[in-house]
Image: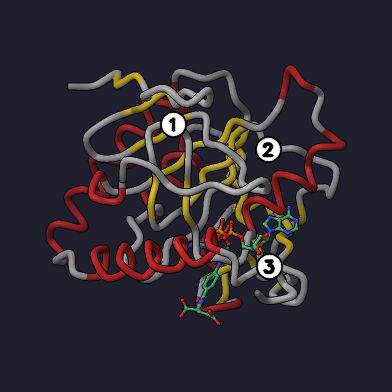
Amino acid sequence: MGMNGNNDPLSDTKKKLRFNMNDERNSLSNIQREQWSNEAIYHMMQVLESMKISNFLVYISFRSELNTRPLIEWGWSKGLQVLVPRCNPKDYSMDIYSLRDWDELSSGSYGIEEPNPLRTSAFGHQCVPDVIIVPGLAFDRMGGRLGYGRGYYDRLYERLQPYVDHRRAPILIGLGYEMQVVNKVPMGRHDAMLDILVTEKAIVNCDKEGNDGINSFQ
Ligand SMILES: Nc1nc2c(c(=O)[nH]1)N(C=O)[C@@H](CNc1ccc(C(=O)N[C@@H](CCC(=O)O)C(=O)O)cc1)CN2
Ligand SMILES: Nc1ncnc2c1ncn2[C@@H]1O[C@H](COP(=O)(O)OP(=O)(O)OP(=O)(O)O)[C@@H](O)[C@H]1O
C-alpha cells in the first residue's frame, strides 16, 4: 500500500479502466471520430442554448478526444465568454483564462494547447464558471467520470467551492463518445459527479442519487 494512496484497490481498478478506454478511443478511425465529434458538439450546443449562461469552461481537445474547437467558435459567435483551463503539473491545479482568439493558445503541459498567459486575460481566481465541460476516458449515466488520473477537474471543483453561492454552482457537463460510457465508473470521495453527460447519441440528465440516468434522446 503506497503512502500516496495510489496503490489502493480503487486506483488499481481505475488504472485498468483508464488503460482499456484509452486504447479503445485511440482505435477510432478519423472519419468516425469526426462524425461523432460533430454530433456530440451539436448536442452540447443544444444543451448550452437551453441554459441562461454567460460563459462556459471548455478544454482544448488533444489525443483522440472529440474535437471541441467548433464549440468554441460557436460560443464566440453567440457572444458567450469562452473559458479555457491551463494546468499546473506542480500541484495539479488549473487556472482559468478567457479565450478570444486561436492565437492566444500555445503548447502547454502534456502537449495540450493551453492559453498563453502572456496573451490571454485571466478569469479571476474567485470567479466561478456557469458551466464546466469535463473531458474523460470513461463516463457513466449516474454522473461518474474517469480522467487521466491526476485529479485536475476534481481539484478545480473543490477550489471553486468557497466562491459558489449555491444557486449558482457550476454545472458539470461530461463530453465524450458513446463508446466511452460504461455501466459504472468506480468513484472515490474526491470525485465530483457530473450533472449532465453529452455524447453523439444522447443528452443524459445524470441522477447523482445512483439510479439510471434519464435519456432525453432516442
Ligand atoms: N484536453 C484535455 N485537457 C486536459 C485534460 C484532459 O483530459 N483533456 N485533463 C484532465 O484532467 C487535464 C490534464 N490531465 C492529464 C493528466 C495526465 C496526462 C498524461 O500524459 N499522463 C501520462 C501518464 C503519466 C504517468 O502516469 O506518469 C500518459 O497518459 O501517458 C495527460 C493529461 C487538464 N487538461
Ligand atoms: N480535491 C482533491 N484534493 C486532493 N487530492 C485529490 C483531489 N481530487 C483528486 N485527488 C487525488 O488525485 C488523484 C487522482 O484522482 P482521480 O483518479 O480521481 O483522477 P481523475 O479524475 O481520473 O483525473 P483528471 O481529473 O486529472 O482527469 C487521486 O490520488 C486522488 O485522491
Label 2 crowd bin: few (<14), some (14–19), many (20+), radius 10 Å = many
Residue 60 is situated, as x and y percent measured from the top left of the image, at: 48, 60
Whether residue 73 is visible here, answered yes or no, is: no
**Looking at the image, which is closer to me, 47 or 145?**
145
Label 1 crowd bin: few (<14), some (14–19), many (20+), radius 10 Å = many
From the image, tell me which residue sits under label 1: 142
Locate residue 120: give its quadrant.
Answer: bottom right
* Mark 2 close to ligand 1, CB under 8 Å: no
Give the residue drawn at x 34%, y 19%: 214
- Name the amino acid type tagged 2: Pro
From the image, tell me which residue sits under label 3: 5
Scheme of image coloration = secondary structure
Sooner in the amino-acid sequence: mark 2 or mark 1: 2
Closer to the observer: label 3 or label 2? 3
* Mark 3 close to ligand 2, CB under 8 Å: yes
SS under mark 3? loop
SS under mark 1? loop
Give the residue drawn at x 14%, y 57%: 32
Closer to the observer: label 2 or label 1? 1
Q: Using the numbered discs, state the Cα–Cα distance from disc 2 to disc 1 in whole angstroms.
A: 22 Å
Image-based side of 195 in relation to 124, left or right: left
Where is 139 relative to 15, above or below?
above
Q: Using the numbered discs, state the Cα–Cα distance from disc 3 to disc 2 in whole angstroms.
A: 30 Å
Image-based side of 3 in relation to 135, left or right: right
User: Looking at the figure, which quarter contains the N terminus?
Assistant: bottom right
**Looking at the image, which is closer to me, 199 or 111?**
199
Where is 115 relative to 77, above or below?
below
Residue 191 is situated, as x and y percent measured from the top left of the image, at: 61, 47
From the image, tell me which residue sits under label 2: 129
Whether residue 31 is visible here, answered yes or no, is: yes
Where is 60 relative to 48, above or below?
below
